[in-house]
Image: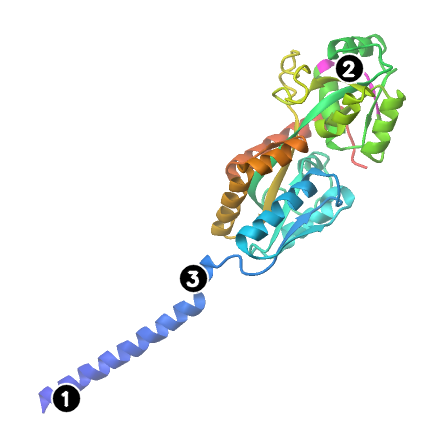
Amino acid sequence: MDLILHRLDMSLRMRAGSVILRCLSMALLLLCPPLAAQDAYPSRPIRIIVPYPAGPSGADNLARLLGPRLAERWQVPVVVENRPGASAVPGHELIANASPNGYTMGFSATSFTTNVALARKLPYDPIKSFERIVLLGTNVVSVAIANKVPANSLAEFLTLVRHQPGKLNYASPGNGTPQHLAMELLKLEAKLDIVHVPYKSSAGALTDLVAGTVQAMVIPLQTAAPYVQAGSIKMVAMMSAQRAPAFPDVPTMRELGMPAIDVDTWYGAFAPAGTPPPIIAKWNAELNALLRMPEIREALAKLGMVPGGGTPERFTRLLEDDIARWIRVVAASKIKAD
């Protein structure tokens, strides 16, 4: 009888243990989605927030170039959503506050860091509110002067400015824009006294540069190129570290004795803070793969862009360096945000 009772007790214990194990298994399944479900990302439409107007801007061009390729590779819709205004701050806020599930991402540009330097009241932390995905590309930035200016090189133009302190002007598409800050950096390094004339757009500033109403301007290469090729303005220097293949005779600032001036406009992909590392890794891998494709590189070259790529850490270092540089320029130049 004792043996029977012992076996019955063992049987009940085993059944109880089995029930407990099944309960634990079900709880784990509820807490952790199956591996297949994790691997299924993305499984629904993705939106890319661009905090600039639709049209000829680098971030928008990249979103509309890369978005359809991602949609094709992932077999889900990828929608580009433009949220311009207020120096791109509302668009960046929208990205920062989005659910960190990989279905809302952002493509941004240099104003992301200049906004920090200008001490704008930002409703997000530029580092802690975002995950960096990858540097998408850079644009070469040039220094151009009006045809009416009696100079044909940067050295000649700087001499002209020094001989007429406070008498010559330079244009920008607005106070606090990357072009404004880049020219202020040149002023600091070359010790120039030249007056800033802010416009409401690049178009208005370029119109007056062509007319000779203003004497100089910092311009992205792809914007300046048709005017230079038409003989409407003169390009005298590249602010980037290397010469541009489209204008091989135009020297860099480093070659002209100003190595501290190494300026590009940049474009990059962001995610809201807290987005899972596997999703960041997937985006990074896919975007790097696209940026290596010959047809993508050719399309970027036509836009005057140099393809980016690399790790999120590389992009983070670029942002930190950019913020530190523009904070220094803004402080030294006593620039105030509008």
The residue wearing badge 1 is 5
Q: Earlier in the sequence, mark 2 or mark 1?
A: 1
Q: Quick one: label 3, few (<14), some, or many (20+) residues within 10 Å?
A: few
Q: Secondary structure at mark 3?
A: helix
Instruction: Tell me the number on the disc at residue 192.
Output: 2
Q: Look at the image and give the residue range highlighted in magenta.
A: 190-196
Q: Where residue 189 appears, x then y in whole percent?
A: 70, 16
Q: Residue at x 54, y 36 (%)?
A: 309
Q: Nearer the viewer, mark 3 or mark 1?
A: 3
Identify the residue position indicated by label 3 in the image: 36
> In the image, 304: left or right of 73?
right
User: Which residue sits at x=49%, y=44%?
Assistant: 285
Circle 3: residue type: Ala
Q: Quadrant of the N terminus?
A: bottom left
Neighbour class for label 1 at 10 Å: few (<14), some, many (≥20)? few
- SS class, disc 2: loop
Say which residue appears at 52% left-offset and 44% top-offset: 284
Amino acid on which the number 2 mark rests in the picture: Leu
Residue 128 placement: quadrant: top right
What separation in Å lies between label 3 and label 1 (alpha carbons)? 46 Å
Measure how far apart labels 2 and 1 are at the Cα level.
100 Å
Which label's residue is closer to the chain start, 3 or 1? 1
- Circles 2 and 1, Cβ within 8 Å, touching? The answer is no
Quadrant containing the C terminus is top right
**Position of residue 258 measured from the top left corner of the image (x, y, whole percent):** 65, 14
Mark 2 or 3, nearer chain start: 3
At which x and y percent is residue 56?
74, 39
Magenta residue check for 209: no
Can residue 150 be seen in this snapshot?
Answer: yes
- The answer to whether mark 2 and mark 3 are in CB contact below 8 A is no
Q: Nearer the viewer, residue 104 or 121?
A: 104
